[in-house]
Image (cartoon, grey):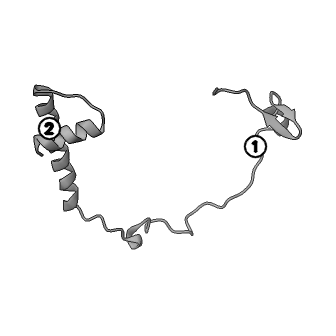
Amino acid sequence: MELNTIQHLCELSRLRYEGEELVRVMDEMTDIVALMDTIKEFDLTYDDTKDNNSISFNEVREDVPKDSFPREKLLANAESSDNCFVVPKVVE
């Protein structure tokens, strides 16, 4: 990368670097771009035939409903208003 490009990117992102810092940022950005270029070496085409072929639907457990926590106990501390649940405000 060129120094002018880095200065332009810094200006766009409202970052202020001067002198040695600017050169360091330029070196770091060059390293980042070089790292991103290595991704091109990988074959990233998706093959859905290779996706989870080891799982057979015959091996999946049966979905059987079972008793859970008592509803009354879960809702004991909930405030109800017009058939809705009221929760405390956490964000202003």
Q: Secondary structure at mark 2?
A: helix
Q: Who is closer to the viewer here, 32 or 1?
A: 1
Residue 2 drawn above or below residue 38: above
In the displayed structure, 17 sits above or below 56; it is above
Q: Residue at x 18, y 54 (%)?
A: 38
Residue 68: numbered disc: 1
> Which one is nearer the viewer's eye here, 70 or 75?
75
Q: Which residue is pictured at 11% across the width and 27% down the height?
A: 19
Name which of mark 2 and mark 1 comes first in the sequence. 2
Amino acid under label 2?
Met
> In this rendering, would 65 be left or right of 49?
right
CA gap, disc 2 and disc 1: 59 Å
To which residue does mark 2 refer?
Answer: 26
Identify the residue shown where x is 61% and y is 60%.
61
Q: Quadrant of residue 46?
A: bottom left
40 to the left or right of 77: left
Which mark identifies residue 23? none
**Tag 2 near tag 1, CB within 8 Å:** no
Residue count near mark 2 (Cα–Cα under 10 Å), binned few <14, some 14–19, many ≥20: some
Residue 62 sits above or below residue 87 on the image? below
User: Mark 1 belongs to which amino acid?
Assistant: Ser
